[in-house]
Image (cartoon, rainbow, N blue to C red):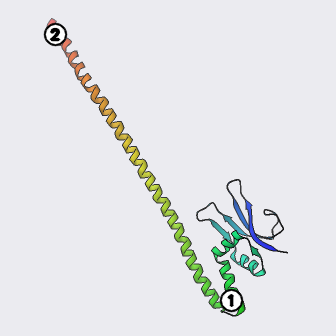
Amino acid sequence: MAVKIRLARRGRKKAAMYDIVVADSRAPRDGRFIEKLGTYNPLTNPASINFDADKAFDWLMKGAQPTDTVRAMLSYRGVLYRKHLQLGVIKGAIGQDVADQRFQQWTEEKNAKIEGKRTDVGAAKDEARKQQLAAETKVREARAEALRQKQAAANAANAPAAEEAPEAAEAPAESTEENA
């Protein structure tokens, strides 16, 4: 029986989530599986990959073949590197302590790189939001200034007419005083 480590789709339309499963290669994509190793969410940035690395390593050592996508995930998380080191230990090329130390060092570097990407993505998002807010503020101030100028022009046009009207109103008042 050929065993594969592959993705099984779940989630609604246009919002896919995947389970990372170990299944018989003859089974349907979303059908029967032997064991669920974890989940994969491609909609987040960076994509969320959560799985039990020890179980995946055990299945790889037993001969399970990952699909291309799952192979990339296992490589990203260091499971394939761990398998490579373990094969070196089995052949006697390196000791177990050296393999563990190399894997630990690789894991620390990889986690720092992932965290750096998360902070860069977050910082870029914040910067884009600040720029958008500044642009909106600039447009709003320009509109407010245009409205002020329009109102000032309207007030200036109404002001001479208002000045003429009180003079006309005062003239009949004087004539009524003269009549009295």
Answer above or below: position of 16 versus 53. Answer: above
- Percent of width and height locating residue 63: 78, 79
Q: Quadrant of the N terminus?
A: bottom right
Answer above or below: position of 171 versus 25. Answer: above
Name the residue furthest front. Answer: 68
**Quarter residue 86 falls in:** bottom right
Q: Nearer the viewer, mark 2 or mark 1?
A: 1
Tell me the distance, in whole angstroms, between the alpha carbons under discs 2 and 1. Answer: 119 Å
- Percent of width and height locating residue 75: 65, 75
Determine which residue is flagged by label 2.
177
Name the residue furthest top. Answer: 179
Q: Mark 2: few, some, or many residues within 10 Å (few <14, many ≥20)?
A: few
Q: Quadrant of the C terminus?
A: top left
Horizontal arrangement in the rendering, residue 25 relative to residue 141 (left or right): right
Answer above or below: position of 126 versus 139. Answer: below
Q: Which mark is residue 148?
A: none
Q: Which mark is residue 88?
A: 1
Residue kind at label 1, given as amino acid type: Gly
- Percent of width and height locating residue 74: 67, 74
Q: Is residue 180 in view from this perspective?
A: no
Name the residue rendered at 62%, 90% in the picture.
98
Horizontal arrangement in the rendering, residue 125 relative to residue 151 (left or right): right
